[in-house]
Image (tube, rainbow, N blue to C red):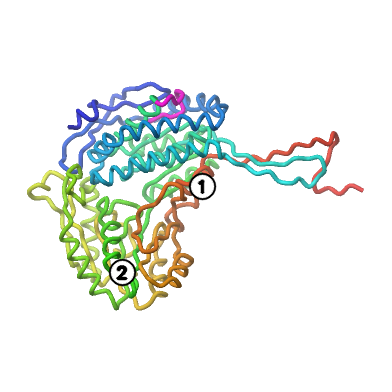
Amino acid sequence: MAETLLKAERLKNFINGEWIDVKESTEVINPANGETVVNVPLSGSEDVNTAVKAAKKAQKEWAQVPAPQRAEVLFRVGSIMKERKERLSQLLTMENGKVIEEARGEVQEGIDMAFYMAGEGRRMFGQTTPAELKDKFAMSQRCPVGVVGIITPWNFPIAIATWKSFPAIVSGNAVVWKPATETPIMAFELAKIFEEAGLPKGVVNVVFGKGSAVGDAMVNHDDIRVISFTGSNDTGRSIASKCGEQLKKVSLEMGGKNAVIVMDDADLNLAVEGILWSAFGTSGQRCTACSRVIVHEDVKERLEERLLVEMEKLTIGDGLDESIKVGPIINKAGLEKIKKYIQIGKDEGAKMLAGGYVMDEGEHAKGHYFAPTLFTDATADMRISQEEIFGPVVSLVPVKSFEEAIEVNNGVEFGLSSSIFTGDVNRVFKAQRDLDTGIVYVNAGTTGAEIHLPFGGTKGTGNGHRDSGVQALDVFTEWKAVYVDFSGKLQRAQIDVE
């Protein structure tokens, strides 16, 4: 099936509009069944240099293309993606493992982003403002930065790439893109779509490889003036440090330890649905996944009972099967990390009610599966309540009041997403004010961001920039202030003239 869909056994870099082979490669494994899907190049710094050289040359001409015309390319990209949605979705599931309905949702997010950012081609607004001197005009405008480097993760291999590349392109930049080696197929397919849509050669370049080789070369390259990264906190901090030394702009979107708050007046059936989707969708491998449920002690036992009943109904397996609701973990390293945190939770005294084991028998024997896991009676200071696990593990933390719930939610180093289930409108408005996260949901889970709003978080989740929404343009543009004096004489602002 992989050969039929992909029609390639080995991927190539896409540099300056050409498909370039690389000698060294590694296998891409379908986490659902352990089968090799394709081989991906392992590029080096010279490949990055070639890509940057092409991007730098192409960007100078691309920046001169009027933004509405640049946008037309993105409209064509979105249209092609829409035509190929089902094929792209199946390929995504094969390389990533997420269930097919989620894969379709992710591809749709990329389609939406194409059309949204294409619209920004006619809304690349600056400002005009009154000048303080007579016969003088003042305005600001957005300008492209130049060559942009984007480094994307395996858990959303096409959505996150579109969040970063589309605003960069419509703003007049050129892109060098390093996808995750675990999920390179979406990058390969998107590069083909860019080519078919008529994007000029060199405006987007895809260099496959490891972070230690390709990523480091991009971060340290003098001609890449922006790095946009989504991934782990450790890697993000290292990138930020290196970019800081070079006075290079950097946008980071990193971890989360997201919580659903369930108050005593909540609709428990709705809360259970929201928790299940947020905690076990994508097998918990989302930066917005719910890994804590902060529940009022008066409804804790009822919530536990309902969660256990519904967790029993979850189907686990190959995501290409339409009946499956929970897919595999990306690789063995991911499984080992989850196993480690299960033991930590037990050692800390949390009570495990369900799951907690690797599923490696029968139909699950060849893949990387972990049983959906529920801890209860966790405390806010436990490591399973503080550290990102990135798996289908959720812990219930009981609280006595709304105020305590807000305090527990905010008492972690991350600040990406939060949620509250309540019927009290006063609590709703207090929660949206007081929850220290970049995203807040009311009577919904912690996942489901829409592309026309900014995506990102506070504290350890990032460094203040946002993906998606019009705010994404701020990452890939510089502001220029322009003054036009038509008085015919030298006028000096702020200098008194008698």
101 or 405, which lies in front?
A: 101
Q: Residue at x 68, y 43 (%)?
A: 128
Residue 176's tag is none
Residue labelled with disc 2: 267
Image quadrant assignment for residue 400: bottom left
CB atoms at circles 2 and 1 under 8 Å apart? no
Give the magenta-colored segment's residue range.
197-206
Extreme residue in the right direction: 498
Residue labelled with disc 1: 471
Confirm whether the magenta stretch covers residue 116.
Answer: no
Q: Position of residue 53 (x, y in %)?
A: 48, 25
Q: Position of residue 224 (x, y in %)?
A: 49, 34
Residue 173 placement, left or right of 360: right
Residue 60 placement, left or right of 339: right
Image quadrant assignment for residue 229: top left
Image quadrant assignment for residue 490: top right
- Looking at the rendered image, the quarter that the N terminus falls into is top left
Q: Which amino acid type is marked by label 2?
A: Asp
Q: Identify the element where label 1 is drawn.
A: helix
Q: Main secondary structure of the magenta part?
A: loop
Pick whichever of labels 2 and 1 is earlier in the sequence.
2
